[in-house]
Amino acid sequence: AAALVYYHHDTLRKNLLTWVVPHDATAETEPHFVQQSLKRDGLPSLDELVSCFGQWRGGNRESGPAPGALSAQQRQEQRDAQLREALTQLHALLIAPIAAQLRPSGRVVFFPAGALTRVPFAALRAAGEEEPQPCLLEQHTVHVGVSMRRLLTSIIAEQPVMEHRASTALVVGYPHEDVGKFESLPGAVDVAEAIGALLGCTPLTGVAATKAAVLAQLE
């Protein structure tokens, strides 16, 4: 079993909302909820915090220094320092408030959204005054999931290409006998049908989403 962590960045109110479903959750378990204000003095915006990862991956490390500018080594040291600072600040925002909900050495699946999809969760680490603290990957088995909304957005972006392909996709949504009750997964069937329409296939939902039906389509 794994703990599930969902994030939502409320850009209007400048809040970070976090829900944690513990690894031993049952149908009656209420998710652990944390709301944080991002209006604190001296705290960079989430976009600023994650921007350095894009610069680090896409920046030009090979270019020589301009007259009077930093040397290549100095620029690299500056980037490394920015990365370390961003990793610790993101750990303080994303991990520290929910650390007590995560089982030591257990599996954790993160579901980020928006700018947080660029966060390297496995590399996050707490700030240490003397010795470097272990990164999250050294403490947990880390996975990053993709939200259905993000998947749907990606599919829509690629739709002109997909329209010319024969679809072999399999979409399954809300495989449950009580197909008329969506309290536990609101909108699941609607999302499955929307993705099925874009991929050119008929989704299996509700009572139709049996193990036998799924295996038959996989053959």
Image (cartoon, helix red, strand yellow):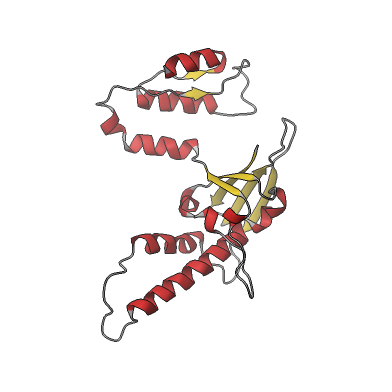
Q: Residue sitting at 61 percent across and 45 percent down?
A: 108
Tell me if I can see residue 11 in this picture. no
Image label count: 0
Left or right: residue 49 versus residue 15 is left
Q: Is residue 182 left or right of residue 192?
A: right
The x, y position of residue 141, in whole percent, is: 59, 47
Residue 205, above or below 77: above
Frontmost residue, 176 versus 8: 176
Q: Which residue is pictured at 73% across the width and 32% down the height?
A: 26
**x and y, in percent, of residue 162 in the image:** 29, 29
Residue 117 in the image, given as x and y percentages of width and height: 47, 50
Q: Is residue 3 above or below residue 175?
A: below
Q: Quadrant of the C terminus?
A: top left
Residue sitting farthest toward the bottom: 68
**Residue 177 seen in the figure:** yes
Quarter holding the N terminus is top right
Identify the residue at horizontal 53%, vertical 63% (top origin).
87
* 175 up-or-down from 132: above or below: above
Q: Is residue 42 left or right of residue 83?
A: right
Q: What's the residue at 62%, 56% (across, down)?
A: 95
Q: Is residue 104 above or below residue 205?
A: below
Q: Is residue 126 left or right of residue 146?
A: right
Where is residue 200 drawn, in percent x and y?
A: 35, 22
Q: Nearer the viewer, residue 202 or 60?
A: 60
